[in-house]
Amino acid sequence: MGIQAWERRVPVAAPEIDGRGELETRPSILPLQIPPNPPLQKRGRGDSWDELQAQVAACTACALHKGRTQTVFGIGSHHQAQWMIIGEAPGVDEDRQGEPFVGRAGKLLNAMLLAIGLKREEVYIANVVKCRPPNNRDPLPEEAAACEAYLKRQIALLQPKVILVVGRIAAHNLLKTDSALGALRGKQFSYADTGIPVVVTYHPAYLLRSPREKRKAWEDLQFARRVFSEEK
Ligand code: URA
Ligand code: SF4
């Protein structure tokens, strides 16, 4: 999980403990009082992510909380990802595992990312809603609205160079439009008032049903890569 990856990178207090142990063997030197957690490191970027994830895990702001096994917050390199991928909602596999895009659609998404040289671990993946809608129905507008602040905060914390939005539902929610997906492809939008570029492509679950559209998705990914490389 992303949070665990972050925790592994947190500087550990071990050197200070070692240092103090050494001082104890030489009593003539005054023991130094080294705080195990320097206050300046207490509130890092990771804390904000941890707090946000905890808020989501406890959220009951819309009816979707009733049917979830667990919330599906997001996954990836949240302190350095330059790409953010946004889907619609957790499905049955995601609800079970607590991670977005782990089912069949997720496997195709991984392959799509690899096609433009991105490993799943290098990007950050999230959904418009964090809880699974019953019977995999589309999230309702009021559910997406109730969940919106979390995604907004994830984007603000991550500051990705480009957002790749997969599928009609996610595109409609992010871009506040009801245009057909075909009309949203191949264009560069920006997210709300942030100036962060947004590129839209087909949802991998749709591509599994309509494999002939994969060629168009490939074009979209190439376009997204161009948009990315033009960002400073
Ligand atoms: N479809 C989505 O939109 N998101 C997931 O996490 C899984 C499938
Ligand atoms: Fe809260 Fe979002 Fe889950 Fe609704 S979908 S309960 S708003 S976390």
Image (cartoon, helix red, strand yellow):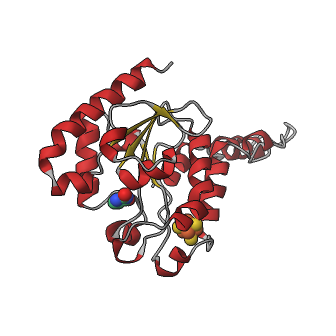
Is 146 rendered above or below residue 48?
Answer: below
Q: Image quadrant of residue 192?
A: top right
Which residue appears at 31% of the width and 59% of the height?
Answer: 102
| Count of number-bearing discs | 0
Give the percent coordinates (x, y) of residue 7.
Answer: 55, 50
Extreme residue toward the bottom, this view: 66
Q: Closer to the camera, 38 or 59?
A: 59
Q: Closer to the camera, 186 or 2?
A: 186
Is 36 rendered above or below residue 221?
Answer: below
Give the percent coordinates (x, y) of residue 159.
Answer: 57, 35
Residue 138 visible at all: yes
Give the percent coordinates (x, y) of residue 62.
Answer: 58, 73
Which residue appears at 63% of the width and 71% of the height?
Answer: 61
Q: Quadrant of ligand 1?
A: bottom left
Q: Closer to the camera, 68 or 195?
A: 195
Q: Closer to the camera, 226 or 10?
A: 226
Left or right for 226, reference 130: left
Residue 116 visible at all: no
Left or right for 167, reference 115: right
Q: Quadrant of the N terminus?
A: bottom left
Left or right for 22, reference 191: right
Which residue appears at 77% of the width and 46% of the height?
Answer: 24
Which residue appears at 54% of the width and 42% of the height?
Answer: 9
Give the percent coordinates (x, y) of residue 196.
Answer: 53, 32
